[in-house]
Image (cartoon, helix red, strand yellow):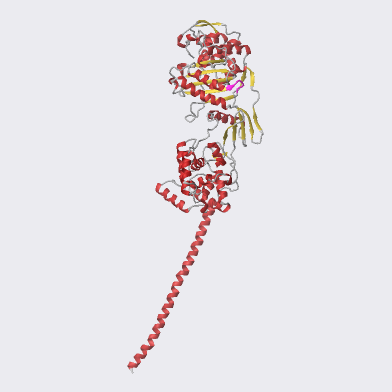
Amino acid sequence: MPKRTQKCKAKSVAPRRRKRTSGKKRGVKRSRSAPFSRAIGELGVFAFTAFIVLAAVFAYFARDLPDTSALWKEGETRRVTLLAADGAPIMRQGVAQGAPVKLANLPDYVPDAVLAVEDRNFYHHFGANPLSILRALIVNANEGAVRQGGSTITQQLAKNVFLTGEQTIKRKIQELMLAFWLERKFTKQEILTLYLNRVYFGAGAYGVDAASYRYFGKSARRLQLGEAAVLAGLLKAPSRYAPTNNPDDAGRRGRLVIEQMVEAGFISRQQAADVIADPVLLARPRFEAAPFFIDHVLRELHGLAGEIDADLIVHTTFDPGVQEAAESGLVAGFAMAGPDVDKVEAAAVLMDGEGAVRALVGGRDYAKSQFNRSVQAQRQPGSAFKPIVFLAGLVAGQTPDTVIVDAPVSVGSWSPGNYKDEYFGEVTLREALTRSLNSAAIRLQEQTGRQRVHAVARDMGWQGALSTGPALALGVDAISPLGLAGVYAPFANGGFRIEPHVIDRIETADGDVVYQRTGLLLAEAAPPAAIAGVNEMMQSVVVWGTGRAAKIPGYVTAGKTGTTQANRDAWFAGHAGGLVAVVWIGKDDNSPMQGVTGGRAPAIIWREMMARALPPPVYTSPQQDNDPIASLLEPGG
């Protein structure tokens, strides 16, 4: 019995264990589904939170995003176009933007060159390239500075059109946001078109058409493969790779673009070899030698046009042929003058008899120094002032044949001497000016009266200060080359005072006249007979006097040399064929020059400039080369 009872108990217990076991299995299933549900809920909360955070970030960075409505418009800055006297453009200040071009009107290799080097995956991304961004982040982290951008063409367009160039996280996020907007708003073709028409290519050129004209002198529609590669290479660093500034780096960068085009499958290896073997030629910029003239025009423009908020067209007095003559004549003259002038500066002004400045040279090398010596430098003219003293004498009743004593002279305690202390006794005024005799000039001034000399100088156009002492006759009062050219202009126009000027008319792009120059001949500067008398004397200066080196074959030339104390300044000023020219050489620190006088280097440079600027002569000048007195003279001041 007991055994049977135990057996029954055993049998009855087993099923209950199975039930408990099965119950445990069902309980396990319920415990696994609960965490899964919780994970889904947590993920939802995280996604919602992330959405809120991203929305807040988006709102934060989007609150000062720029207006995108002007995407297709050009810049709003005022443009100033300068025209030469013949109407040809010489400069545009402000944004230089070419005509908008469509991709369909460009050779395929123009956009291909840009894509190859800037964004090879342009047609396959959504505005940003995550791999490029990641690569840039790694490089920049390793370098500890921003070395690589990773920007797509769409991002570059967003930055160039809407944003500044600052390197901040905020600007980068805004760039991405705008890039996504551009990709959603426009097709890839439209984005690439916008990019090519708005991106900066250096040298003031925005857009591929402006760049093509700037560097190659033609429309972007006519670009060759090598030229397209050079332009595409500029985009990384326009100022550094601009072929006008750094042709070697521009060439290397262009060859890199060609190699990138081969790797991208845009051109074949043979095409690349052919292009590399064919050198790219830059168009020579028109009026490359006129930066000093342009600088002066822009300074004058500010005073004449003020702050007019309109695009302006400025008609200048600039003559490209005369400017080229001045530049080439300067080089030739210095080459002929010898080593004494290797380390000196120079300035020159060429104008017509009515004061219209045709050319300016403000220094020997604009790239090294932008100081415009022709306008800004105030230097003593020395003996180049003497024609004013002699003109005052003729206005007072003297003639070129009036005799005056050339001997040591003293005015109070001041006793100036002649060049090399040579004196010639009784001489005519003609000979006194021709030989540039200091003592005779001072005697004439003292006889005529300094106040009369002052008055004649003012009537001729001298605008600066004038000394009241006896040294007035020796040109101790400073003046610019432009100012001295203005003083000499009445000798070329028959005796009328003028105002040197570089601007004839200013008008808006719509044709409204802002400024018009009138009254070129302001007033009579001196009687015609007196002007003719001084011209006769200055012709003698060139025939057998201190200015013999300035003689221009076939032209009647009148002028005067000038040399200041210790040879700090050397001048030649004069006129021929209706053109007035002044040449100055010296050192910017006003230190002495060794053995340089107005009758040497300045006279030679003056001659070389004027001979190139004037038309070929149609008659033989009466001025002779074989004057017997000439061999006795040294080309002094």
Rendered residue at 47%/36% (across/down) = 247
Residue sitting farthest toward the bottom: 1
Q: Which residues are magenta?
A: 351-355
Is residue 626 rendered to the left or right of residue 7?
right
Does residue 288 lie above or below 486 as drawn?
below
The majority secondary structure of the magenta stretch comes to: loop
Of residues 300 and 276, the one nearer the viewer is: 276
Measuring from the top left, give residue 472's x and y in whole percent.
Answer: 53, 14
Q: Is residue 353 magenta?
A: yes
Measuring from the top left, give residue 354's x and y in whole percent.
Answer: 62, 21
Measuring from the top left, give residue 89's x and y in whole percent.
Answer: 59, 32
Does residue 384 lie above or below 119 as drawn?
above
Can residue 462 be seen in the rendering of this structure? no
Does residue 188 lie above or below 94 as drawn?
below
Is residue 260 rendered to the left or right of residue 511?
left
In which quadrant of the rendered view does residue 523 lie? top right
Does residue 410 lie above or below 329 as drawn?
above
Q: Is residue 188 magenta?
A: no
